[in-house]
Amino acid sequence: MKKLWQLIFVGTLGLTVCLAQDVVSIVHGTVKKVDKSTKTVVVKAADGTEHTIKVADQATIHGTKKGFDGLKEGSEVVARYTVKGTEKTADELGTVGKDGMKVTKGTVTKIDKGAKTMVVKSADGTEKAFEYTDNAAKDVGKETGKGIDQGAKVTVYYTEEAGKKSLISLSDG
């Protein structure tokens, strides 16, 4: 009986540790609702899943001159968020479009972790070089650990200012 209680204790402790870890995710979809009083957005992904995401006070907002207050229902957005327990909190969020975030899909042809750069070749054969942000460096490192390297298919979310492309985040495929 003592061993059973030890097993239950160890299992519970392991589950608690797993739940305490921050899991970084990306959602690309349409804003269904903006709640300024709670600073949350509901984003509906292409698969129909709705994500309620709290936007952190220090979050970087791309594509609106008014920051969070510039987000509108119906806008296409990309959110990079972490999950703690059941709460999703965005540290970066942006509208997709001319002045906001951009999306490209392709194959990784080069990663230089020292220079924090990545080159991605799209289906039409054009190559785009990206410098990646500190947040994206964490994502690239995690994804690289799972096998994202040269030849991997990725979706890149980035901003562009003065001809410089800054990779914000990426996901498989």
Image: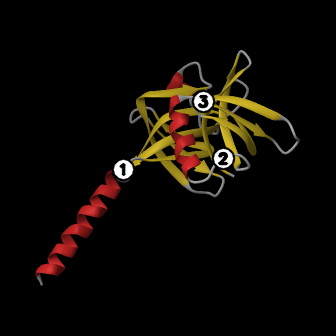
Q: In this rendering, which labeled residue sits more in front, label 2 or label 1?
A: 2
Q: Secondary structure at mark 1?
A: loop
Mark 1 is on which residue type? Gln
Residue at 24% in and 62% down: 13
x%, y% of residue 144? 58, 47
The foreground one among 7 and 115 is 115
x%, y% of residue 169? 59, 38
Figure check: 34 above or below 25: above
Is 7 positioned to the left or the right of 57 in the image?
left
**For mark 2, what is the residue?**
149
Q: CA distance from mark 1 to mark 3?
A: 25 Å
The foreground one among 162 and 61 is 162
Q: Is the residue marked by circle 3 packed among few (<14), some (14-19), or many (20+) residues within 10 Å? A: some
Q: Secondary structure at mark 2?
A: loop
Q: Is the residue marked by circle 2 packed among few (<14), some (14-19), or many (20+) residues within 10 Å? A: some
Q: CA distance from mark 2 to mark 1?
A: 25 Å
**For mark 1, what is the residue?**
21
Looking at the image, how many numbered discs can be counted on the residues?
3
Mark 3 is on which residue type? Lys
Is 84 positioned to the left or the right of 164 in the image?
left
Decide: marks 1, 3 in contact (CB < 8 A)? no
**For mark 3, what is the residue?**
116
